[in-house]
Image (tube, rainbow, N blue to C red):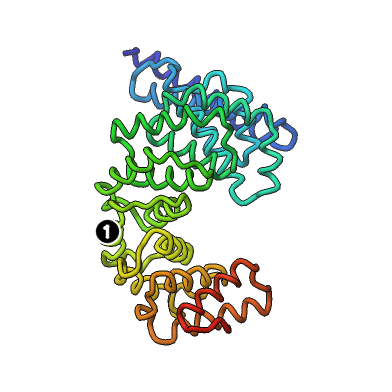
Amino acid sequence: RISSEAFRVRMAAVAILLHVCSVLSWRAQAFRSPKHATHLSLLQARVSLLTGATSAGRCVPLLQENKEAIFNTQLFRADDSEAVLRIVDDHLDEFKAREIATALHRVAARNKYKRARRDVLLRDARLERLVDAAKEQAAQFSAHCVADVLWSMATLNHFPSRMLVPVLTSVNSHLDLQDFKGHHLSTIVWAFAKLNTKPVRLLERIEEQTVAKLEYMNMQNCANLMWGFAKLNYQPIVLLPHMMDALLKPGMLDAAKHVEVADIGYSLGVIAQPGECSDLLRALAQRAAPDTTLRWLSSRQICMLIDTFAQLEATEELPEGLLDAWICIVKIAHAETPLMARDGAKLERSLERLRGGAAW
């Protein structure tokens, strides 16, 4: 512990330093370089940590855990992927597994809907350095970090071959530890599907462990998991009955978004058998009715739902008039923007099964 006089002197110095940082930040806003902004922000974060330590009457040095906290704070505050990559460029050698996973996640999140920027990003040498660091640190990833890295790779549609073995090994290690949460497992399966990666043994283990975690999974988790299994053409025979029960719990499907309705509908068409999930199909149809999520469904999603009900021979589960409403919306959308040939052919096959005729 330090004396009260020394403590007051130290706190006064900290206050002056904070004030100087704030003034410099305000005065230099118009002309400072991004790199200087990052360094100033790091200085402010260090001072904040020091203030928190000394206010408790303790003298705490800037240890590694403090630096990690600073880096993570800066990564989360970064406005765009360029700001993240500047931090990576300056401090990657000091990053541990958590900061590497966080940096990848922030870069991917900032470019989730910006395809043109993603294409430019994938040619950035700083991103490649970050990917190489992820490969080297993969064995140190926590369960959360593994899921974040796979989500990032899937979102960027960038999974270099050198990452395959380290990341899959890390997934396997955490399956051994059984420390994945339900949403981690959902994210991992979704990412595998987006990356066209089908490690069957890992999928089997994920399916087994998901059964015990379903009660903690929300609608989005369940939809992403089901979609991933279906996209990979993996049949979760053990999980499916439990998943149906989970989705039929009160309030679950009532809160489903249109994309979740579409993903679950698609999944059932791939992994379920006729007569296996009548109750769930009935509930799904009610959620895709005109007074619920139907207005948000695209013509392609509606074609997919019609195809699922046709394949599973579940016409009787459709509320009266709903099939006609679906077809009417597809016709209107088709008049404005013609269906893709694949979707049109799928719709014709479905109506042939449902009505004995393909006219629509």
Q: Is residue 330 visible?
A: yes
Residue 347 or residue 135, whichever sits in front? 347
Residue 251 or residue 131, whichever sits in front? 131
Q: Position of residue 333 (x, y in %)?
A: 62, 76
Work out whether 317 lies above or below 208.
below
Q: Is residue 39 visible?
A: no
Which residue type does callout 1 highlight? Pro
Q: Position of residue 132 (x, y in %)?
A: 57, 25
Q: How many marks?
A: 1
Q: Position of residue 324 (x, y in %)?
A: 49, 85
The quarter in which the C terminus is drawn is bottom right
Residue 100 or residue 190, whichever sits in front? 190
Tell me if mark 1 has few (under 14), some (14-19) or many (20+) residues whose alpha carbon lies within 10 angstroms of its own. few
Q: Residue furthest right?
A: 31
The quarter in which the N terminus is drawn is top left
Work out whether 355 lies above or below 127.
below
- Secondary-structure class at tag 1: helix
**Circle 1 sits on which residue?**
241
Quarter location, residue 256:
bottom left
Residue at point 75%, 34% (across, down): 31
Residue at point 48%, 23% (across, down): 137
Work out whether 200 lies above or below 166.
below
Residue at point 44%, 32% (across, down): 168
Q: Position of residue 150 (x, y in %)?
A: 49, 39
Q: Is residue 47 left or right of residue 182?
A: right
